[in-house]
Structure formats: structure tokens, C-alpha cells
């Protein structure tokens, strides 16, 4: 870094670095943070922090991330132990997850945590709470909903979620700042943006941690942190279960949750509640807590095995007379160029059962005259077959 006029400095090599965080430290130095790559989608992107003294001299700089995920820093504050807490976003198997990183005073990593959800979560502001935990405000985009919600999550001192809250309605909402005004009391500020007319307004909310405990209130349902778990054989991912309340609040559940895997030859739960892939295939898991249940899909992918790329039907179109049975074969095509007859394994549906029906041997029995179509499904692929009965 080269110093220019008083109070300014220029990085000698800032290619691929974007900055969006500037934090003063107790010793008078400054911490600058952001992302090492200019594009979030770049596979080598990492959260980047730079510590400079009052003269603009670099004291240390580090890039954080495990090399297989894309990570960016959005906010950093100094903690009471002289270290740093960083929040931002990192890529997960189901999208982008809120990222939390604890550092010592010299930028050495003490621990990192990602808080996965069913959609995309971004941490935009972080504070150290009076109990030693952390409160993060940001944005949550549900996989099932087009709009975004402002998002607040409280963790313990090691980054494990204790409670979370979504704020907002049918617009695009985001949390940009958070303050603690008293033990267990937090104020969150942000923006509500209405896409239809481009208007925006301030979002301001006061939250009570005591209210998150919900004494006596029953959840309306349970939810797992992902709709589909995707992993490789031998790889493990934690499975988190939440109690969902009438106001859309979600409370992480710990003790008392039971997990079941429908097909233990594909995946299983090991010690500590982590889901581990065993062999390539698909199944689903069930989480049970106090008589309530929720399910999620599991897909174990062997990167060395040929991947299913498509289906085809023979014939592509059936033309039958009433009462006639047509022979139909379904073939799976794989990334290594191989094909396989999966007629007996595919699920075959007919749009109009009055015109035809699928027999146990996968033959198609023609009904009354008319035109319709059949759909064969196998894995995540499908193929459509036209059916005409004369």
C-alpha cells in the first residue's frame, strides 16, 4: 500500500478486490473488508480483510474461506476480547448461507460458521451481544417465495443459532443495522422496497429476546433447514430442525428431535445429528419432535459415477385402436454415453385416463377415441409420449 496525501492510501495490487466494510479499531487502526474476487460467482472468491494503521501501512491482510465455497464479508466489528467478528455470505449446497467468522486480534481464524436455510441468507450487520453471543441482521430469500424478508438471527458465542426472526410482508425487505439497547432487547433498521412502483420506506423494529422463548405457545409446524440435502458418499452435513410459529418466527430445536432415513442404504444419521451420504441414490428423511413431523429429500451423488442426463421413449408417439395394447419402452441416458432400459423403474402417468391406461407390464391399453399424452419420470428427468386412439 502506498500513502498519498495525508489520510489517504492506495493498494499496490487491488485487482479482483471489492471493498464494502470500513471499521475503526480501538488502537486507532482501520479494518477494511469485502471480497477478494469482483464476482460473487467466481469459484476462488473469498472474504477479504485488510488492517492498516493511521499512516496507511498494511499490518496484515487475509483471505478467508475453505477454497470450495464462495465467501464475502459484509460487516465486521471488534469484540470485547480484542478480536473481530465478521458476517457476510457463503455458498452452500442449497444456495447462499449467512456467514459468521471469529478472528483474533491479528486476523487469525478462531472459528467460522454458516447458518443454512431453505433459501438464500445474507448477513449485513453484526454485533456482540451482552451475553457474549452475536446478533446478525440481514436478508432472507425463501426458495418458495419471490420476495425477500429482513432477517435477524441470534447465536451463542460459538456461532450456533439460538433464535431467528423474519420481518416484513409482501415486499422486498432487508435488515441493514442492529443495536442492543438493553439485555435481550434489540433494535433493527432497514429498508422496505415495493417492486411494483419502485417506492421504498424505512423498516424499524424492536425485538425482545424474551419474546423469542414463546412460553406456552405451540408451533404450527416443523421445518428442516433445507428442502433437499445434496451430498457425496462419505460427506456429512448437519440437519437443523425449527419450530415455526404463527407469525413466521422460527426457533431452532435441539434436544428431543428424532431423525429417520427412509432408505439407510443411501444415507444415515451419525453421531451428533449429521446426515452422511452412503451410496448414490435418492431418499428422504423425517424429523420428529413432540408428535410433529417434517420431511426433506436427500440426494447422494457420486461424482465418479455416470450422471443421468435424459430420458427417451420408444416409440415417441403411440397410435392405437380402441382396446389395443401398445408396447412402450423408456430408456435412461448417462453422461458416459451409456443407455439403460428403465421401463419397469420409471413412473408413468397418463393425462386423460379415459383415452388410455398404463398396465402393470407398462403396456398402454387404448380406451375411447381421442388424443392425450403420457409422462414418464425417472430421477429428475422426464419424457412425454403422445397417444392417439382412433
Image (tube, rainbow, N blue to C red):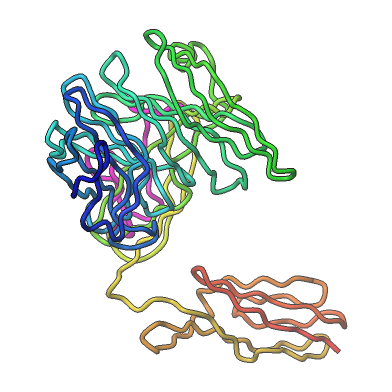
Left or right: 248 with respect to 198?
left
Indicate the quadrant where residue 319 lies.
Answer: bottom right
Whole-percent x, y for residue 40 in the image: 39, 56
| Point 46% across, 84% down: residue | 333
Q: Nearer the viewer, residue 255 or 63?
A: 63
- Residue 144 on the magenta span: no
Indicate the quadrant where residue 155 lies.
Answer: top left
Q: Nearer the viewer, residue 118 or 127?
A: 127
**In the picture shown, does residue 110 fall above or below 184?**
below
Q: Is residue 259 visible?
A: no
| Point 56% across, 85% down: residue | 312
Whole-percent x, y for residue 213 in the image: 44, 15
| Point 13% across, 43% down: residue | 60
Indicate the quadrant where residue 383 lies.
Answer: bottom right
Whole-percent x, y for residue 308 in the image: 43, 77
Left or right: 150 with respect to 285?
right
**In the picture shown, does residue 60 fall above or below 66?**
above
**Residue numbers of the magenta segment:** 251-277
- Furthest-top residue in this view: 182
- Residue 259 on the magenta span: yes
User: Which quarter of the figure is the C terminus placed in?
Assistant: bottom right
Whole-percent x, y for residue 271 in the image: 22, 40
**In the picture shown, does residue 57 fall above or below 154?**
below
Q: Is residue 305 visible?
A: yes
| Point 72% across, 87% down: residue | 325
**In the picture shown, does residue 101 fall above or below 126?**
below
Amino acid at each position: 500500500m502506498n500513502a498519498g496525501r495525508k489520510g489517504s492510501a492506495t493498494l499496490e495490487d487491488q485487482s479482483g478486490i471489492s471493498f464494502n466494510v470500513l471499521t475503526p479499531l480501538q488502537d486507532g487502526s482501520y479494518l477494511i473488508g469485502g471480497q477478494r474476487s469482483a464476482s460473487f460467482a467466481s469459484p476462488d472468491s473469498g472474504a477479504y480483510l485488510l488492517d492498516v494503521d493511521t499512516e496507511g501501512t498494511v499490518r496484515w491482510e487475509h483471505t478467508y474461506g475453505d477454497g470450495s465455497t464462495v465467501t464475502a464479508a459484509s460487516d465486521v466489528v471488534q469484540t470485547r476480547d480484542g478480536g473481530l467478528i465478521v458476517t457476510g455470505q457463503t455458498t452452500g449446497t442449497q444456495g447462499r448461507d449467512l456467514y459468521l467468522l471469529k478472528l483474533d486480534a491479528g486476523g487469525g481464524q478462531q472459528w467460522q460458521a454458516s447458518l443454512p436455510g431453505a433459501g438464500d441468507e445474507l448477513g449485513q450487520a453484526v454485533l456482540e451481544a451482552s451475553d457474549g453471543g452475536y446478533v446478525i441482521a440481514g436478508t432472507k430469500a425463501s426458495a418458495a417465495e419471490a420476495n425477500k424478508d429482513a432477517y435477524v438471527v441470534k447465536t451463542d458465542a460459538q456461532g450456533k443459532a439460538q433464535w431467528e426472526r423474519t420481518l416484513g410482508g409482501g415486499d422486498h425487505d432487508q435488515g441493514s443495522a442492529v443495536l442492543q439497547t438493553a439485555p435481550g432487547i434489540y433494535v433493527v433498521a432497514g429498508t422496505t422496497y415495493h417492486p411494483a412502483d419502485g417506492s421504498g420506506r424505512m423498516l424499524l423494529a424492536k425485538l425482545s429476546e424474551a419474546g423469542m422463548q414463546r412460553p406456552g405457545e405451540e408451533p404450527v409446524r416443523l421445518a428442516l433447514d433445507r428442502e433437499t440435502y445434496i451430498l457425496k458418499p462419505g460427506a456429512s452435513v448437519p440437519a437443523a430442525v425449527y419450530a415455526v410459529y404463527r407469525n413466521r418466527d422460527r426457533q431452532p430445536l435441539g434436544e428431543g428431535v428424532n431423525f429417520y432415513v427412509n432408505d439407510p442404504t443411501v444415507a444415515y444419521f451419525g453421531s451428533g445429528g449429521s446426515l452422511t451420504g452412503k451410496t448414490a441414490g435418492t431418499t428422504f428423511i423425517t424429523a420428529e419432535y413432540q408428535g410433529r413431523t417434517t420431511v426433506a429429500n436427500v440426494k447422494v451423488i457420486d461424482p465418479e459415477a455416470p450422471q443421468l442426463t435424459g430420458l427417451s421413449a420408444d416409440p415417441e408417439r403411440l397410435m392405437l385402436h380402441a382396446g389395443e395394447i401398445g408396447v412402450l419402452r423408456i430408456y435412461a441416458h448417462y453422461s458416459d454415453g451409456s443407455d439403460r432400459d428403465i421401463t419397469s423403474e420409471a413412473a408413468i402417468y397418463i393425462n386423460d385416463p379415459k383415452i388410455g391406461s398404463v398396465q402393470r407390464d407398462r403396456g398402454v391399453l387404448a380406451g375411447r377415441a381421442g388424443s392425450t399424452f403420457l409422462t414418464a419420470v425417472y430421477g429428475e428427468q422426464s419424457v412425454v409420449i403422445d397417444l392417439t386412439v382412433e
